[in-house]
């Protein structure tokens, strides 16, 4: 029998989850809501995260543009995605939601601007 304890990060409540696997079936205990069940199982089967960072931007009021993935990516690719983000430099103006890196590392996730920046 497999057993793992974790803290749920879906909401601020932070439930202490216990995920067990027996006979190819997962059981989640300690969750306050149903989202905890989904989170606990996904953390065992395929943990994913949304990545937030910044990229260099020229010709804008600020030096860095905040960006975010438009969907969650596998957790083990976070550092590789961060390396891709760190190699990007863009030119202002940029609108919120504009794609900065399309289909990053073939994950079907795009890196998008999370705010607009006007040109100086």
Image: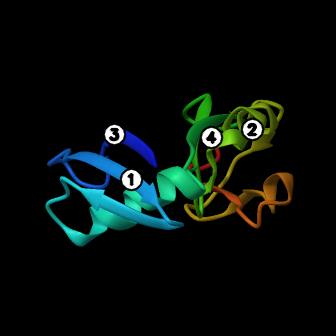
Residue 98 in the image, given as x and y percentages of width and height: 66, 63
Q: Residues within 10 Å of mark 4 (few under 14, many from 20)?
A: few
Identify the residue position indicated by label 1 in the image: 20
- Residue 85 bears which disc, if any? 2
Quadrant in the picture for residue 60: top right
Residue at 50% across, 66% down: 23
Q: Residues within 10 Å of mark 1 (few under 14, many from 20)?
A: some
Q: How many marks?
A: 4
Foreground mark, 4 or 2, reads 2
Note whether residue 43 is visible: yes
Q: Identify which residue, 28 or 77, lies in the foreground.
A: 28
Foreground mark, 1 or 3, reads 1
Identify the residue position indicated by label 3 in the image: 6
In the rendered structure, which disc, 3 or 4, sits on the residue that comes first in sequence?
Answer: 3
In the rendered structure, which disc, 2 or 3, sits on the residue that comes first in sequence?
Answer: 3
Q: Identify which residue, 5 or 88, lies in the foreground.
A: 5
Quadrant in the picture for residue 91: top right
Residue 79 in the image, given as x and y percentages of width and height: 71, 32
In the rendered structure, which disc, 4 or 1, sits on the residue that comes first in sequence?
Answer: 1
Q: Residues within 10 Å of mark 2 (few under 14, many from 20)?
A: many
Residue at 40% across, 44% down: 3
Q: Secondary structure at mark 2?
A: helix
Note whether residue 49 is visible: no
Asked if labels 3 and 1 touch by Cβ distance under 8 angstroms, the answer is: no
């Amino acid at each position: 029998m497999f057993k793992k304890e974790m803290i749920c990060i879906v909401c601020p409540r932070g439930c202490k989850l216990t995920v067990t696997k027996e006979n190819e079936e997962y059981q989640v205990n300690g969750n306050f809501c149903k989202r905890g069940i989904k989170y606990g199982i996904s953390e065992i089967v395929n943990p994913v995260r949304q990545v937030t960072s910044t990229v260099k931007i020229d010709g804008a009021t600020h030096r860095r543009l905040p960006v975010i993935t438009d969907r969650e990516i596998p957790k083990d690719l976070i550092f590789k995605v961060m390396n891709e983000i760190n190699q990007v430099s863009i030119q202002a103006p940029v609108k919120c939601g504009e794609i900065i890196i399309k289909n990053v590392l073939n994950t079907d996730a795009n890196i998008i601007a999370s705010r607009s920046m006007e040109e100086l």
